[in-house]
Amino acid sequence: MDYQLAIENAPDAVPGGTGILLLHPSTGETDRIDTDFLKTDTDRFLVISTRTTAREVKQKLDHYDVDEEQAEILDTLSIERGYSRRSTDDVHYVSSPADLEGVLEVTRDFLERTEGKRRISLDSITEMAYYADEGRVRDVVTELLDLLDEHEAVGLFHLSKGVHDEEQVEQFLGPFDAIVDLDRDGNVDSDFDRL
């Protein structure tokens, strides 16, 4: 199963199981790339948000005209910030971005009970690494990529290159099939040679 992509300077489509790493400056405007990725050729998608609350994710989806009927959101921040939240059919909560097992569990459940073309957006690896051990975050990212492969889904994972040193960035690059690199001026470069 192939998925169409709406990413500048990238192939028109990628096979199911593809994991894409979006490298961006810490002040980079990633919303356009993220929402174009989510709304193209998709039946269901899961936004794993470690940077904003579910309410803010919904505002972003609405602003960029993404069909919320297809969306599920995993909010890792609200409980950490002291808001009491109950999960619904389309919004899930874990205690904090450091709850890596919880993130894995919600993602696995989403992929096991949905069908068709599924996409995952994780925004962002950088925030997870701020809250949890970086080595463990790398392991969980690899496990998430394995789930994409197993269920023929595709994923876009955000990493802020201004926050990590070169060696850390290289370590995170390792398991990904493709890299999309956004610069400060909004230019996009990509490397899909690993596919």
Image (spheres, grey):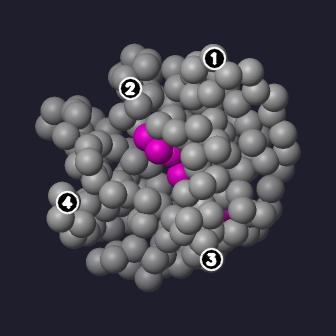
Q: What span is in magenta?
A: 117-124
Q: Nearer the viewer, residue 127 or 165?
A: 127
Residue identified by numbered label 3: 41
Find the distance from the CA under tag 3 to the CA under tag 1: 37 Å
Considering only order in the chain, which callout, 4 or 2, is on the residue closer to the N terminus?
A: 2
Asked where in the image residue 109 lies, by quadrant, the reply is top right
Whether residue 135 sits left or right of residue 151 in the image: it is left
Find the distance from the CA under tag 3 to the CA under tag 4: 26 Å
Q: Position of residue 168 (x, y in %)?
A: 23, 32
At label 3, the amino acid type is Asp
Mark 2 secondary-structure assignment: helix
Q: Nearer the viewer, residue 142 or 183?
A: 183
Label number found at residue 129: 2
Residue identified by numbered label 4: 183
Residue count near mark 3 (Cα–Cα under 10 Å), binned few <14, some 14–19, many ≥20 = some
Label number found at residue 82: 1
Quadrant of the image containing the C terminus: bottom left
Which mark lies nearer to you, 4 or 1?
A: 1
